[in-house]
Image (tube, coloured by chain):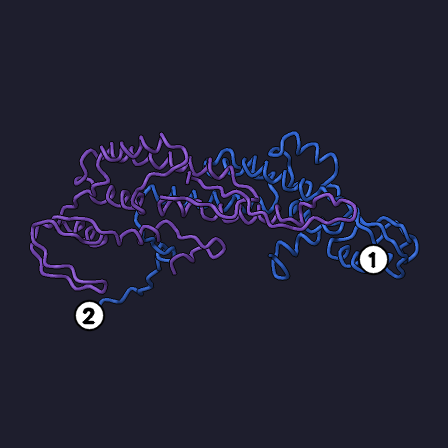
Chain colours: A purple, B blue
């Protein structure tokens, strides 16, 4: 069952995440006519040689049989990606909004639809750079957590990136919680009086500014 | 919290702790290798596993002294450079043992010392585990305690799985059992006349 490939860590494996990413919609241009497809998750209308929106799994299946060409999603153009990369480099604590499954979608499209993407090498290297910069931000953010951190907020992080850091972060937070609990760090007791144990909420460590 | 069923907890409780007996004990000379009779004297210094020391402490039969791995020497080393200290040789269950010892021993600074050590080593673990190169790993990971190496392994395995996925390849793996060729034992049939 998905998410249970390693019961101790309870993460998704990478192929499982890729499978989940295939539910995203993309635009295709079929080059044949076909009548409507009725599948469990819905009906996909009769296909004419004009733009149709289908889920990615269907687009890949059609592409493998040479029945369509896939239009690259608009976030995957060179200009848009360079903009995103510049913005990522400029803001050291924020993540730019990107589609949730951008890593998986881009990999699937590179593998199966090479000829449909203009400037494929440029796009590929841009996505790699973006991924590298974002992961580096996650790491620097993780250095600052301590026992006071009750929760870590990562806005705009994509599915695959979350999946990579999830086991580490969960374990690290547990370990810090165990070490920093008030009974472990015992305050020096003054004679007679006992300080009331106030649970200090601590500062919220966001990995992005509010 | 790990409790009765956790294997790491059980193994951790086997760690020897040196205790000083407050009462004389008869018939358990086995515990003290230096005693001539079958008794343990009052005031004798003995090494007991943690689970036994804990129980006897609750019955006020012993007093527990600080284990060697929390001594001043270790503290100085950790203050010098937390990440390079080989904690596995001293005590592979450094942190868990420390957590358990804190309520039992008179030294109250162990808790904050553990916290300091962990924070220092955590940064190293963070950077090394995510770089996913095979070279730096063997030297560093032999210095980690059990708890830290679980953390390290978790990050490294998820990173390696991602890298492997990224290289591509088909999603369907052929089952290994199909790789072996079966011997087809068709006997050579005699030609029919």
Residue A181 picture location, percent across and down = 62, 49
Residue at image position (60%, 34%) is B83
- Tell me the quarter of the image containing the C terminus of chain A: top left
Q: Are marks 1 and 2 in contact (CB under 8 Å)?
A: no
Q: Residues within 10 Å of mark 1 (few under 14, many from 20)?
A: few
Left or right placement of residue A45 versus residue A182 in this view: left
Residue found at the far right of this picture? B37
Position above or below: A89 against B147: above
Give the mark nearer the N terminus: 1 vs 2.
1
- For mark 2, give the secondary structure: loop
Q: Which mark is residue B193?
A: 2
Q: Residues within 10 Å of mark 2 (few under 14, many from 20)?
A: few
State the SS at label 1. Answer: loop
In the image, what residue occupies the spot 13% across and 49% down? A68
Relative to A41, is A88 on the left or the right?
right
Q: Residue furthest front?
A: A193
In the rendering, at what x and y percent does residue B122 appear?
Answer: 56, 39
Q: Give the residue number, with chain letter if any, for mark 1.
A: B60
Chain letter for mark 1:
B
User: Which quadrant of the figure has residue B167?
Assistant: top left
Quadrant of the image occupied by residue A190: top right
């Amino acid at each position: 069952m998905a998410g249970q490939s390693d019961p101790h860590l309870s993460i998704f494996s990478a192929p499982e995440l890729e499978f989940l990413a295939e539910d995203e919609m993309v635009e295709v241009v079929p080059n044949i006519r076909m009548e409507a497809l009725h599948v469990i998750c819905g009906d996909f209308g009769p296909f004419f040689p004009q733009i149709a929106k289908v889920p990615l799994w269907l687009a890949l299946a059609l592409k493998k049989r040479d029945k369509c060409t896939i239009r690259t999603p608009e976030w995957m153009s060179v200009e848009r990606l360079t903009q995103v990369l510049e913005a990522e480099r400029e803001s050291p604590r924020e993540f730019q909004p990107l589609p949730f499954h951008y890593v998986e979608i881009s990999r699937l499209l590179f593998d199966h639809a090479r000829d449909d993407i203009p400037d494929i090498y440029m796009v590929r290297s841009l996505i790699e750079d973006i991924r590298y910069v974002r992961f580096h931000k996650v790491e620097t953010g993780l250095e600052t957590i301590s026992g006071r951190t009750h929760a870590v907020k990562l806005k705009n992080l994509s599915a695959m990136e979350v999946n990579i850091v999830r086991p580490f972060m969960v374990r690290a937070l547990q370990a810090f919680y165990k070490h920093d609990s008030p009974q472990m760090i015992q305050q020096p007791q003054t004679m007679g009086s006992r300080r009331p144990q106030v649970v200090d909420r601590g500062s919220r460590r966001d990995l992005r500014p509010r | 919290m790990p409790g009765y069923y956790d294997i790491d907890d059980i193994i951790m409780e086997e760690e020897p702790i040196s205790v000083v007996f407050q009462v004389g004990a008869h018939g358990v000379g086995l515990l003290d290798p230096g005693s001539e009779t079958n008794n343990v004297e009052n005031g004798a210094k003995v090494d007991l596993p943690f689970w036994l020391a804990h129980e006897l402490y609750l019955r006020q039969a012993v007093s527990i002294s600080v284990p060697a791995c929390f001594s001043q020497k270790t503290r100085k080393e950790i203050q010098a450079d937390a990440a390079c200290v080989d904690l596995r040789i001293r005590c592979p269950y450094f942190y868990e043992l420390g957590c358990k010892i804190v309520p039992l021993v008179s030294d109250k600074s162990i808790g904050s010392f553990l916290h300091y050590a962990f924070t220092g080593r955590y940064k190293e673990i963070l950077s090394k585990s995510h770089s996913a190169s095979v070279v730096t790993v063997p030297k560093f990971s032999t210095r980690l305690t059990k708890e830290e190496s679980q953390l390290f392994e978790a990050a490294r395995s998820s990173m390696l799985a991602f890298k492997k996925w990224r290289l591509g390849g088909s999603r369907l793996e052929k089952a290994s059992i199909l790789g072996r060729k079966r011997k087809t034992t068709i006997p050579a049939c005699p030609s029919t006349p």
